[in-house]
C-alpha cells in the first residue's frame, strides 16, 4: 500500500499573524523563516496524527484487494472518494462505478468496501488506485483549535532553538506536552 499526496493544501492552517502573536515578534525580517517553520510544523502534525488539516487530495495504491474487500484509507478526515480505478493484467485502466463500492467516511479510519465479484484480474503491482479528498476544509478556521495550537507550540519551540535547528541538533526534540496535545486526534492504525 502506497499513499501519495497529489494536490497539496492551498494554505497553512496557521497564519503568519498568528505565529507572530505566538512568538511575540513584531518585525518582519524573519517572516520567511517563520513561514517555513509553520509549513514544517503542519507537516509534522499531519505525519504524527495521520490527518490532513487543510483540504488536499491523495491517491492510495494497492497491489490487490484484501480478502474481506475492505480498504482502510490512511489519511483522515476523508471528505470524498473521488475515483476508484483498477488496472488489468495488460495495464489497462478501468474506473469502478460508485455503485460498486460503499464508503464509510466517518470511520476512524475511513473505509471503502468493494462489492464481491466486481473486480477482474489485476496486474501484480498497483492494481487498484483510489483518489480521495481529505482535510477539515478549505479554510484555516475549519481546523480544530487543538491542532492549530500544536502547530503554534512547535513553531515556537523551533523558533526559540533556531540555531540548533540550523546545526541539525534539534532532530527528534519536541516541546513538552506536544504529544499529549495531539493524542485525541491520532488516527487508529490497524
Image (spheres, rainbow, N blue to C red):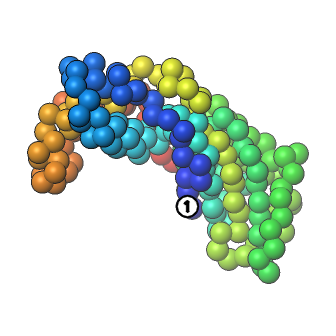
Vertical position of residue 114 compared to residue 103: above or below: below
Query: Dot 1, crowdedness within 10 Å: few (<14), some or many (≥20)?
Result: few
Vertical position of residue 62 compared to residue 131: above or below: below
Q: Residue at x 53, y 41 (%)?
A: 9
Image coordinates of residue 22 in percent, x first then y, are: 26, 21
Instruction: Give the SS element for disc 1.
Output: strand
Q: Which residue is mark 1?
A: 2
Image coordinates of residue 26 in percent, x first then y, are: 22, 21
Image coordinates of residue 154 in percent, x first then y, are: 27, 34
Residue 131 is left or right of residue 175, and the answer is right
Q: Residue at x 66, y 35 (%)?
A: 79
Q: How many marks?
A: 1
Image coordinates of residue 13 in percent, x first then y, are: 45, 30
Which is nearer the eye, 144 or 105?
144
Q: Residue at x 78, y 42 (%)?
A: 102
Residue 163 is left or right of residue 107, and the answer is left
Q: Residue at x 11, y 47 (%)?
A: 164
Q: Is residue 57 visible?
A: yes
Q: Is residue 154 visible?
A: no
Q: Residue furthest bottom?
A: 90
Quadrant, the N terminus: bottom right
Amino acid at each position: 500500500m502506497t499513499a501519495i499526496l497529489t494536490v497539496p493544501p492551498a494554505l497553512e492552517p496557521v497564519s503568519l499573524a498568528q505565529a507572530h502573536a505566538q512568538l511575540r515578534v513584531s518585525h518582519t525580517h524573519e517572516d520567511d523563516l517563520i513561514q517555513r517553520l509553520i509549513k514544517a510544523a503542519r507537516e509534522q502534525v499531519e505525519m504524527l496524527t495521520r490527518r490532513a488539516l487543510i483540504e488536499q487530495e491523495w491517491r492510495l495504491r494497492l497491489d490487490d484487494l484484501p480478502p474481506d474487500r475492505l480498504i482502510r484509507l490512511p489519511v483522515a478526515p476523508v471528505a470524498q472518494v473521488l475515483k476508484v480505478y483498477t488496472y488489468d493484467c495488460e495495464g489497462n485502466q478501468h474506473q469502478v462505478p460508485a455503485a460498486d463500492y460503499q464508503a464509510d467516511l466517518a470511520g476512524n479510519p475511513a473505509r471503502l468496501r468493494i462489492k464481491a465479484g466486481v473486480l477482474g484480474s489485476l496486474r501484480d503491482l498497483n492494481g487498484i488506485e483510489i483518489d480521495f479528498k481529505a482535510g477539515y476544509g478549505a479554510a484555516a478556521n475549519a481546523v480544530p483549535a487543538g491542532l492549530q495550537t500544536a502547530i503554534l507550540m512547535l513553531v515556537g519551540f523551533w523558533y526559540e532553538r533556531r540555531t540548533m535547528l540550523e546545526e541539525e541538533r534539534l532532530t527528534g526534540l519536541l516541546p513538552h506536552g506536544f504529544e499529549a496535545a495531539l493524542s485525541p486526534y491520532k488516527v487508529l492504525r490497524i
